[in-house]
Image (spheres, helix red, strand yellow):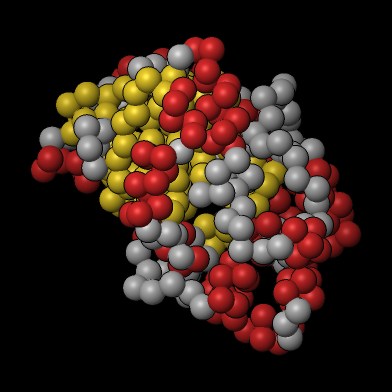
Amino acid sequence: MPEHTADPLDRKIIAALIVDGRATWSTIAAALGEAERTVARRGSRLLETGMVEVRGMADPHRTADSDPFIVHGRCRPDSTLTAAVALAHRPESVTVYVLSGPQHCYADIWAPRRRQSRLFLQEMATPSGFLQMDISPVLEYIRTLHDWEPGILTETQTAQIRRIPKTRWPQFTDPVVLDREDKALVRLVVENGRASFEELSRLVGISEQTVKRRLDKMRQSGLLTFRAVFDPALIGLPVAALLWIRARPSRVSTVAEALAGQPFLRYAAIIMGDYQIVADFRLPSKEALRELMLEAEWLEHVDRLESSLILETLKQSRVLASDLG
């Protein structure tokens, strides 16, 4: 957790990297109306200190024939962190939280189809510290971090920065087979989403023009996306809450549509299990959270609402918290 929030210009630079993690400093500077030298210096500092990481993410459904699940459960109080750390270090986990409330651990898992039974019934059946583990398949995404924009930039600024049109991510279509060069490119940008075309060209052994063309093609098809990974407290959103929502079946779509219009919604999915929707909110204050939980219009369609504060983020977008500054 950062000790302070970023200043207004740094917030805008972070917001620009959310729009396009590979946007050049000159593109960001032009959109923000700032000097390129200033933006480059500020942006480089954010990246070099590890306050912000930019990582590529390949669509797990199409590249690894994997399906999404939410894994959550109760732990012994003295073993909650141990159980969460074990989940965070699993290669299948994308996001891992430690929570307040009846659910202590939460993980977003992409499980390969050929290993789902073994993964859930053997490998993850008795991790240290768990008293109960629930596995909720994801049926549909309402919003992912690919879609989240915190409202810091204007529509005009966002349009100037977004070079590749936004596509749906992930896309639940047929798996694809990548060739050697594309696999190498994906592997490299997963580690460093802002690696230069020159560096990628040298490491993969193809021309810079081919690197750019291949990355653009994967991004335009929705196969590859780039994420800016950071603590939302940096941009003035220090309150993190997870809501579990149960609604009448005929009203689930109504609630989902209402949630999709919430500016503080970072992630939400329709899931199987006791609750139909799980939603990850990042808010500026506890007062904003109170208003969300007690005054939102969509609450009239909700039969039951369970809430938890996110006490600690151990992993997000496949990046371990220990890797962030």
Residue 290: percent from the left, percent from the top? 34, 47
Q: Is residue 121 left or right of residue 212?
A: left
Instruction: Give the residue displayed 52% in from the left and 57% down from the top.
Output: 229
Q: Tell me if residue 108 comes above or below residue 215 in the rendering.
A: above
Q: Tell me if residue 70 comes above or below residue 214 in the rendering.
A: above
Quadrant in the picture for residue 262 = top right
Q: Is residue 54 left or right of residue 102?
A: right
Instruction: Give the residue displayed 61% in from the left and 63% down from the top.
Output: 152
Q: Tell me if residue 111 comes above or below residue 281 in the rendering.
A: above
Quadrant in the picture for residue 159 = bottom right
Residue 80: percent from the left, percent from the top? 19, 41
Instruction: Give the residue displayed 54% in from the left and 12% down from the top.
Output: 250
For the C terminus, the quadrant is bottom left
Closest to the observer: 155 or 221? 155
For the N terminus, the quadrant is bottom left
Q: Is residue 13 left or right of residue 205?
A: left
Q: Is residue 152 left or right of residue 239?
A: right
Instruction: Give the residue displayed 88% in from the left and 59% down from the top.
Output: 209
Closest to the observer: 11 or 317? 11
Residue 253: percent from the left, percent from the top? 58, 21
Q: Tell me if residue 48 comes above or below residue 320 in the rendering.
A: below
Residue 145: percent from the left, percent from the top? 57, 46
Q: Is residue 92 visible?
A: no
Numbered circles on residues, count = 0
Q: Is residue 104 visible?
A: yes
Closest to the observer: 136 or 262? 262
